């Protein structure tokens, strides 16, 4: 490909642009490889898979980013005008075009397959037997967690029975299965190594159940009941946030997930809550 | 070669009102769109400054602000509801009333007849009507900011049922959201009138010799955009009408049974909240391309002009724009991966989304191919066209993370999304619009903008946009949710605060730099250096055959005849390094 009828001119503007592109590449490398800010600590089995997909995309896009911004900077620095020369008169190269097109498509297909493998493991795989189930009902601006209690059976709920503050999920207290149910607000518990299935509902508008450390995010949609599951791998307290704009108090719709070290810890917590509830009645 | 002013030949002299205000001249309408959109940009920009103020110093009392906005700042602290209204109005104003209006409304109107060798649009009256309806929609959306019982609070996406049950969600919301819907409805109608006009004009009014494959890429992009708009806008209009029925007519298109609000269960039943999202994004994703395609077209033409080199692979540029447009109707679900939509659809939409990345990548390669071996003239317009490529690539690549559904689970609704769409569909189009203004300003006003100020504007803007929007990717990686009033409410976001302060300070500086542009623009309209020739940039396309500024009727007695494509720069053996489209074969050597 002819470069025109002369060497071209390296211009101040061109070099300045190239220098900025170099700074951009440098800062990106610092941010994405040195990682002064990065993902919150992984605390679930699927977390590593999702981060793995992110890393794969980061490698592909990172190489493309450095190549394109670098080449753009180089060309702009290298091919200024001196007012006398002509540029090259070439404007087609079907082979190069086809190569770049199929090359890009190839990498995109690889990313689709890598990503879908993880997507399928999350959405197309049922929770394993022995999974603990929690019903989560979102409302402006709080999270209600409903546990079945020692009998393992959820009591019946009905929106008509909801009484904010007194019966937040509309639990039918005449249902025998509801007797030992536990309903708590903004406080969720799980056990390390034990999968949790969350059944998400919303009382009013759309909210989104976001556990950054678990890499879990799922919208809670009124009129729908959506199940997702994850398996905690670390004990401790983790923040749960609402990720979908749900009104003025959206920012303060926060809860805490406590991952207990043993089932015994969780049972103790349930017992304590149950005692508080019956004391309250 | 001063072409004689066409006004005297074809049209009687018009009075001030008919000439500059109620004009049917496409150029005046284009400028009306431009000035209106710039006004909206100032409002939308100022709203974002308030947002950045809050995000950087969420719990610091600001008594100055409390004096300016006594209702919105309580004891100097911003009210959370005010923050949400800022989010909503900033997004709405920028997406619709700035970007859609400036790229298709301003440049589309100004350039279509000029670049295809026509005297005006196919339907000049409809064109004027389109502007006046647009202006009305601007007034309505701005009034939503000031109504007594509060601005809309649903975000620019207005997800139902928050938007459908506004009055119940926040007692202050009501009229604001209604005005929002009305403004969007009017905007849509205006867009439909414009789109109809654009398609008809480009398809039927091209001058002799101007075959489709000789069109400048700006024209291709405007044609494809207009078709996208005609197919996408009606869906938004329909959704807005259904939402109005839900709000005022007691229907339940988007409201399911069993909603508990205000201490009772609503009687609505049968609706589905996801229906709104499907309708909105079926419009909303093509809307992204309605904004970016004209930016791509304009940047391509301006790039080629100042590279003094033909655009690389013109045909592939056209085909990739057409395929982007077609695919843009089958990718909307990537906004809804975690919405509760069937995860099987998530798989489908991941595939279509990564497919649409391919034509975008092709365009990037072609821009690089254009700069390779060029002889660049570094005008302000050229710099902004080059900057366009850089920011488009940065924002485009982060889209691949979000299009991969598994990664999107974590990144959805975080600042990663905010970083991505600002770079790719706000900053990239903004750069193209700046390039277009510096480039066509002589044709619009018969004067140049100041090049030194233009270059200062470019360098500081390029640094500013990267300082503001690039770190937002990192915020998203840490999990920082978007649209939250106070990040310090969360322990895991506290380490982000240094970045939030950095972004806010950069944003204030970036906004300050835009004053250089505004001053340059308005001073140059009246006092810029006069343009003494038709074709000051030595470009090839037809608008440069007309005087600066172009008179009513555009061309002289005879319409130009086209003999070649729009990219004959540096043709070997030609006398000049540009050969206008009107030069017959062989005559370029003379």
Image (cartoon, rainbow, N blue to C red):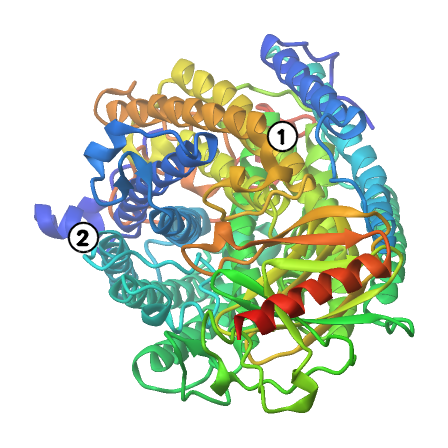
| Residue B149 in sight in this render | yes
Numbered disc 1: secondary structure: helix
User: Does the CB distance between marks 2 and 1 fall below 8 Å?
Assistant: no
Q: Position of residue B581 (x, y in %)?
A: 53, 41
Residue B11's disc number: 2
Circle 2 or circle 1, nearest the eye: 1
Mark toward the start of the polypeptide (2 vs 1): 2
Using the image, determine if residue B259 lies above or below residue A95: below
Q: Position of residue A5 (x, y in %)?
A: 74, 17
Task: Specify the farthest residue to the front.
Answer: A279
* Front-lying residue, A45 or B538: A45
**Residue at the (31%, 32%) spot, across then down:** B548
Numbered disc 2: secondary structure: loop
Using the image, determine if residue B12 lies above or below residue B283: above
Q: To which quarter of the image does residue B373 belong?
A: top right
Q: Position of residue A202 (x, y in %)?
A: 56, 72
Q: Position of residue B119 (x, y in %)?
A: 33, 53
Residue B560's disc number: none
State which chain disc 2 sits on.
B
Classed neighbour count for the residue bearing mark 2: other residues with Cα under 10 Å, few (<14), some (14–19), many (≥20): few
Label 2 vs label 1: CA separation?
66 Å
Locate the C terminus of chain B and report the quarter of the image it occupies: top right
**Residue at the (75%, 12%) spot, across then down:** A7
* Front-lying residue, B386 or B68: B68
**Residue at the (46%, 23%) spot, across then down:** B505
**Residue at the (44%, 75%) spot, across then down:** B239
| Residue B532 in sight in this render | no
2 and 1 marks on the same chain: yes
A240 displayed left or right of B177: right
Locate the N terminus of chain B and report the quarter of the image it occupies: top left
User: Which residue lies under the disc numbered 1?
Assistant: B495
Q: How many marks?
A: 2
């Amino acid at each position: 490909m002819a470069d025109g009828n002369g060497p071209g001119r390296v211009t101040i503007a061109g070099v300045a642009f190239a220098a900025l592109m170099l700074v951009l590449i440098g800062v990106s490398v610092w941010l994405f490889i040195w990682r002064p800010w990065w993902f919150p600590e992984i605390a679930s089995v699927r977390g590593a898979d999702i981060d793995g997909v992110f890393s794969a995309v980061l490698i592909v896009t990172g190489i493309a980013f450095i190549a394109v911004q670098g080449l753009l900077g180089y060309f702009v620095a290298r091919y200024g005008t001196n007012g006398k020369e002509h540029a090259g008169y070439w404007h087609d190269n079907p082979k190069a075009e086809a190569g770049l097109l199929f090359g890009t498509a190839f990498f995109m297909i690889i990313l689709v397959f890598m990503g879908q493998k993880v997507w399928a493991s999350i959405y197309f795989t049922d929770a394993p037997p022995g999974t603990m189930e929690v019903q989560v009902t979102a409302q402006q601006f709080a999270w209600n967690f409903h546990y079945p209690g020692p009998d393992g059976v959820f009591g019946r709920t009905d929106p008509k029975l909801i009484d904010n503050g007194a019966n937040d999920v509309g639990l039918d207290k005449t249902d025998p299965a509801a007797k030992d149910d536990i309903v708590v607000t903004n406080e969720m518990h799980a056990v390390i190594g034990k999968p949790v299935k969350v059944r998400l509902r919303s009382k009013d508008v759309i909210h989104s159940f976001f556990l950054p450390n678990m890499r879990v995010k799922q919208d809670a949609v009124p009129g729908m009941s959506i199940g997702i599951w994850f398996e905690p791998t670390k004990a401790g307290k983790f923040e749960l946030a609402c990720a979908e704009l749900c009104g003025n108090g959206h920012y303060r719709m926060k809860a805490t997930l406590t991952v207990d070290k043993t089932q015994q810890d969780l049972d103790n917590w349930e017992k304590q809550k149950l005692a508080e509830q019956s004391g309250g009645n | 070669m001063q072409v004689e002013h066409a006004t005297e030949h074809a049209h009687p002299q018009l009075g001030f009102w008919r000439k500059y205000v109620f004009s049917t001249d496409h150029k005046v309408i284009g400028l009306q769109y431009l000035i209106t959109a710039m006004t909206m940009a100032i409002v939308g920009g100022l709203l974002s400054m308030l947002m950045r103020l809050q995000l950087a110093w969420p719990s610091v009392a600001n008594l100055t602000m409390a004096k300016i906005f006594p209702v919105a700042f309580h004891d100097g602290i911003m009210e959370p509801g005010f923050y949400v209204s800022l989010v909503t109005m900033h997004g709405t104003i920028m997406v619709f009333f700035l970007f859609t209006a400036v790229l298709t409304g301003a440049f589309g109107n100004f350039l279509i007849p000029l670049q295809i060798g026509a005297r005006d649009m196919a339907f000049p009256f409809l064109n004027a009507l389109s502007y006046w309806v647009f202006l009305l929609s601007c007034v309505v959306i701005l009034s939503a900011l000031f109504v007594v019982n509060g601005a809309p609070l649903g975000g620019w996406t207005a997800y139902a049922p928050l938007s459908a049950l506004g009055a119940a969600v926040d007692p202050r919301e009501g009229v604001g959201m209604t005005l929002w819907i009305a403004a969007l409805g009017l905007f849509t109608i205006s867009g439909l009138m414009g789109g109809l006009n654009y398609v008809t004009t480009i398809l039927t009014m091209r001058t002799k010799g101007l075959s489709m494959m000789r069109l400048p890429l700006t024209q291709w992009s405007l044609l494809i955009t207009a078709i996208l708009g005609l197919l996408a806008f009606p869906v938004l209009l329909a959704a807005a009408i259904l939402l109005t029925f839900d709000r005022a007519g007691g229907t339940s298109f988007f409201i399911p049974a069993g909603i508990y609000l205000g201490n009772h269960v609503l009687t609505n039943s049968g609706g589905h909240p996801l229906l709104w999202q499907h309708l909105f994004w079926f419009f909303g994703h093509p809307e992204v391309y309605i904004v970016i395609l004209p930016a791509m077209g304009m940047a391509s033409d301006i790039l080629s002009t100042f590279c003094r080199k033909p655009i690389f692979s013109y045909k592939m540029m056209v085909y990739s724009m057409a395929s982007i447009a077609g695919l843009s109707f089958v990718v909307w679900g990537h906004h809804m991966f975690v919405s509760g939509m069937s995860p099987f659809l998530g798989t489908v939409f991941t595939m279509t989304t990564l497919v649409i990345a391919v034509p975008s990548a092709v365009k990037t390669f072609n821009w690089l191919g254009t700069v390779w071996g060029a002889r660049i003239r570094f005008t302000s317009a050229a710099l902004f066209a080059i900057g366009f490529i850089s920011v488009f690539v940065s924002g485009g690549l982060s889209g691949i993370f979000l299009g991969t559904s598994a990664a999107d689970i974590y990144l959805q609704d975080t600042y990663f999304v905010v970083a991505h769409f600002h770079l790719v569909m706000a900053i990239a189009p903004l750069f193209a619009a700046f390039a277009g203004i510096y480039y066509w300003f002589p044709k619009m006003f018969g004067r140049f903008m100041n090049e030194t100020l233009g270059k200062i504007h470019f360098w500081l803007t390029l640094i500013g946009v990267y300082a503001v929007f690039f770190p937002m990717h990192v915020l998203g990686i840490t999990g920082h949710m978007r649209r939250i009033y106070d990040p310090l409410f969360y322990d895991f976001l506290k380490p982000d605060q240094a970045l939030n302060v950095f972004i806010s300070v950069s944003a204030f500086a970036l906004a300050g730099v835009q004053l250089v542009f505004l001053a340059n623009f308005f001073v140059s309209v009246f006092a810029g250096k006069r343009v003494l020739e038709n074709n000051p940039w030595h470009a090839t396309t037809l608008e440069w055959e007309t005087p600066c500024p172009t008179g009513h009727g555009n061309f002289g007695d005879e319409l130009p005849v086209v003999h070649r494509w729009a990219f004959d720069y540096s043709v070997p053996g030609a006398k000049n390094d540009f050969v206008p489209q009107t030069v017959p074969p062989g005559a370029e050597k003379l």
